[in-house]
Each structure stands twice: as structure tokens, then as C-alpha cells.
């Protein structure tokens, strides 16, 4: 049985009631997202609250709202936030992005580690299915929702399977979300990138391309990955 919690330097994540556990994708996005302090940030599909808490640690003046459709995940995220040093700046809410109503507020940034297994067989567990497949949040609805709640000039940060990136990019472009920063992620020097980190903006910017290697040939964390995540891992 997997460990029901994961200890970071400044907070602890309990995730035994969440469909998706703490994983490299979420840690990568939380550590990488190129945002600025003082932003208002929406974390879509917050799960255990991992990314919301990582962003709260990185940006001491930012306020973060995490939303999720799974009641058990929202309850556990509430508990994780309450036990953290960032309880006054992170709010968790039971809501789908499609139903989120912010009549008096838009966000400086939206972050999401989305459901993305569009073409694989659905797992038998319903909550895991919702957490990892596009049944509850198809890419087009995620992109439309992000465009709706973002301020002009706002940032949309995401991690995707590399094979899904081009289609996602085109859908963002159609809604005037322009690619600003793309980082390809390799799990080994000998393998092609499996994940892509990307930031889109509601404005035209010069696009920047990077590469991120997670593991070296001997299976150890790469120096660049250690630098990226050094403020979080024990």
C-alpha cells in the first residue's frame, strides 16, 4: 500500500482520500510555473491541494483558490491547507471550472495538472477515472474556462503529455491564448520527452523553449531537477 502522506519541507500532504496521489507531474508544475508574487491564482483540479500549497510557498503575497469536483479530495485539501503555514492565503472550494462563477473577480493566473488520458481505457474506479480522464473536463472546456476567468495579460500554466500538446496549443490559439513558454520534460537522457510544461497568455509574447531532464542515466535526479524542486523535497 502506498504511503498515505508525503512530507515536504514546509508542509505535509495527506492524500489517502484523493484519487490521484502526489506525483512528479504535480510537483513539476508547482515548482516550474513562471508566475509572479502578488498574483491571484486559480488551481483547477486541486486534488490534495499540492500545487496550491507549492505556489503559496513560492509566492508569499499571492492568494490561491483551489477547486475540485471530488468531495473527498476537497475535504482532504481543506485539511492539508489548515495544517499548513499558508492557511490564510489558500482557499479550497467544491466546484467544477465550468460552473465557477466569479462575477466580480478574474484571476492573474490559472494552473492545472489536467485529466488527459483521452484515448486509453477508463479505469474501473470512478473517482480515479474523473481525476485522470477528460470525461469531466475535456480540453476544450478547460481552455474555454481558463480564457473566461483570466484577466487580460493573465497566464495559463499547464502540464500535458507531449503527444497532446500540439492539439492543445491550437485550441488555445483559437481563443487568443498565446504560447509564451514551453518546456519539454524527459524522464531519461535516452528517451523522448513525455511531458510538456507550457504557459499561455492573453497577449502576444515572444515564446521561449526549454528542456528539463528529470533523471540521469544512473536513475538519479538530475542537477537541474534538484535545483527546480530543491525548496520542496526533503
Image (spheres, grey):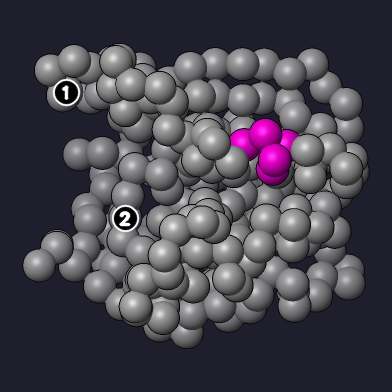
- Magenta stretch holds residue 166: yes
Residue situated in front as seen by the camera: 53 or 111? 111
Q: Residue furthest bottom?
A: 71
- Predominant SS along the magenta part: helix
**Residue 113 percent across, percent down from the top left:** 52, 52
Where is mark 1, residue-wise? Answer: 220
**Relative image position of residue 187 (x, y in whole percent):** 32, 28
Q: Horizontal placement of 234 versus 40: left or right? A: left
| Position of residue 67 measured from the top left corner of the image (x, y, whole percent) | 59, 69
| Left or right: 135 as drawn, with respect to 29 | right
Residue under the image location 75 percent in, 78 percent down:
99
- Give the magenta-colored segment's residue range: 165-169
Mark 2 closeness class: few <14, some 14–19, many ≥20 residues within 10 Å:
many
Q: Quadrant of the N terminus?
A: bottom left
Name the one closer to the observer, 33 or 64. Answer: 33
Q: Residue at x 43, y 25 (%)?
A: 193
Disc 2 secondary structure class: loop
- Left or right of residue 38, residue 206 in this image: right
Query: Where 85 falls versus 122 (above or below)?
Result: above
- Report the disc number at residue 189: none
- Is mark 2 in CB contact (under 8 Å) with mark 1? no
Identify the residue shown where x is 69% and y is 69%.
Answer: 97
The residue labelled by disc 2 is 22
Q: Residues within 10 Å of mark 1 (few under 14, many from 20)?
A: few
Residue 37 visible in the displayed image: no
* Label 1: which secondary element: loop
Alpha carbon separation for disc pair 2 and 1: 19 Å
Quarter of the rendering containing residue 166: top right
Front one among 139 and 67? 139
| Residue in the image at 67% along x and 56% along y | 139
Amino acid at each position: 500500500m502506498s504511503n498515505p502522506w508525503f512530507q515536504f519541507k514546509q508542509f505535509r500532504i495527506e492524500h489517502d482520500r484523493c484519487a490521484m496521489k502526489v506525483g512528479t507531474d504535480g510537483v513539476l508544475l508547482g515548482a516550474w510555473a513562471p508566475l509572479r508574487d502578488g498574483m491571484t491564482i486559480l488551481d483547477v483540479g486541486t486534488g490534495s491541494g499540492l500545487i496550491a500549497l507549492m505556489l503559496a510557498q513560492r509566492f508569499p503575497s499571492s492568494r490561491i483558490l483551489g477547486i475540485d469536483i471530488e468531495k473527498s479530495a476537497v475535504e482532504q485539501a481543506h485539511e492539508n491547507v489548515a495544517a499548513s503555514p499558508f492557511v490564510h492565503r489558500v482557499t479550497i472550494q467544491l466546484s467544477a471550472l465550468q460552473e465557477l462563477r466569479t462575477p466580480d473577480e478574474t484571476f492573474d493566473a490559472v494552473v492545472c495538472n489536467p485529466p488527459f488520458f483521452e484515448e486509453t481505457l477508463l479505469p474501473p474506479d470512478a473517482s480515479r477515472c474523473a481525476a485522470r480522464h477528460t470525461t469531466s473536463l475535456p480540453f476544450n472546456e478547460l481552455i474555454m474556462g481558463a480564457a473566461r476567468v483570466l484577466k487580460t495579460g493573465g497566464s495559463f500554466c499547464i502540464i500535458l503529455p507531449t503527444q497532446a500538446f500540439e492539439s492543445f496549443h491550437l485550441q488555445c490559439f483559437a481563443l487568443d491564448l498565446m504560447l509564451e513558454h514551453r518546456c519539454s520534460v524527459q524522464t531519461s537522457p535516452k528517451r523522448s520527452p513525455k511531458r510538456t510544461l507550457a504557459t499561455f497568455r492573453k497577449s502576444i509574447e515572444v515564446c521561449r523553449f526549454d528542456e528539463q531532464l528529470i533523471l540521469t542515466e544512473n536513475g538519479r535526479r538530475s542537477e537541474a531537477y534538484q535545483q527546480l524542486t530543491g525548496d520542496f523535497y526533503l
